[in-house]
Amino acid sequence: MKEKILIGKNEFTLGTDGDYVGVMDIWGKDTKVFLDIKEDQDGVIDTVVEKIRWLNDNRDKVIDVFMEDNYQYVDVINDMIEKGTFRAYAPISENDFREALVIDNVCIFIRGRNSEFTLDLYAQPDYLLGHLGNMEIDSRYEVEFGGLNG
């Protein structure tokens, strides 16, 4: 496999674990992207561009699925604010929580037409209390919450 792949202006370098690692703009932020490629395949660049474009166009969909299983964090954070164990000027709304979510990293598993990807969400401020929310997106762009890490 090649040592480097260029996707647009973004350089991906082959790591010691066999994944390519690079940075791309996702949701307005430079985000680390890992490419798990089984073998040299045609269409890798097109697949990566398609997945990242989908992510940038579907932020609300990803967050909606995350919130289905994690809506209680708004109440947890507001309880902590009230008790003085979380620093904030005022209680937060669901919209505040949603707007705080950003992507930490993305891993794209390139398998031809069955390419899938995962991503980890975190919050700024840290409304997830040190955890990352794992999201799984299949080749048909169906989104599932994969659990909390950390």
Image (cartoon, grey):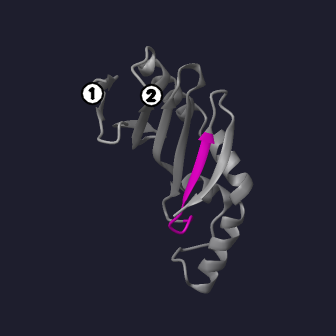
Residue that carries the numbered disc 1 in the rendered image: 4
Relative placement, left or right, of 144 versus 89 is right
Direction from residue 129 to residue 20 in the image, left or right: left
Work out whether 11 lies above or below 33. Answer: above
Q: Residues within 10 Å of mark 2 (few under 14, many from 20)?
A: few
Query: Amino acid under label 1?
Result: Lys
Q: Residues within 10 Å of mark 1 (few under 14, many from 20)?
A: some
Q: Which stretch did the figure color magenta?
A: 127-136
Q: How many marks?
A: 2
Q: Tell me if residue 16 is in the magenta stretch.
A: no
> Mark 2 sits on what residue?
38
Residue flagged by tag 2: what amino acid is it?
Lys
Residue shown at 43%/14% (left/top)? 42
Q: Residue furthest right?
A: 68
Q: 95 or 113, which lies in front?
A: 113
On screen, residue 96 above or below 46: below
Q: Is residue 23 above or below residue 114?
A: below
**Which residue corresponds to the image point at 51% horizontal and 56% vertical from the top-left?**
122
Q: Nearer the viewer, residue 41 or 106?
A: 41
Residue 140 marker: none
Where residue 138 sits in the image (x, y, percent)?
Answer: 63, 33
Q: Nearer the viewer, residue 127 or 114?
A: 114
Sequence-earlier tag: 1 or 2: 1
| Dot 1: element | strand
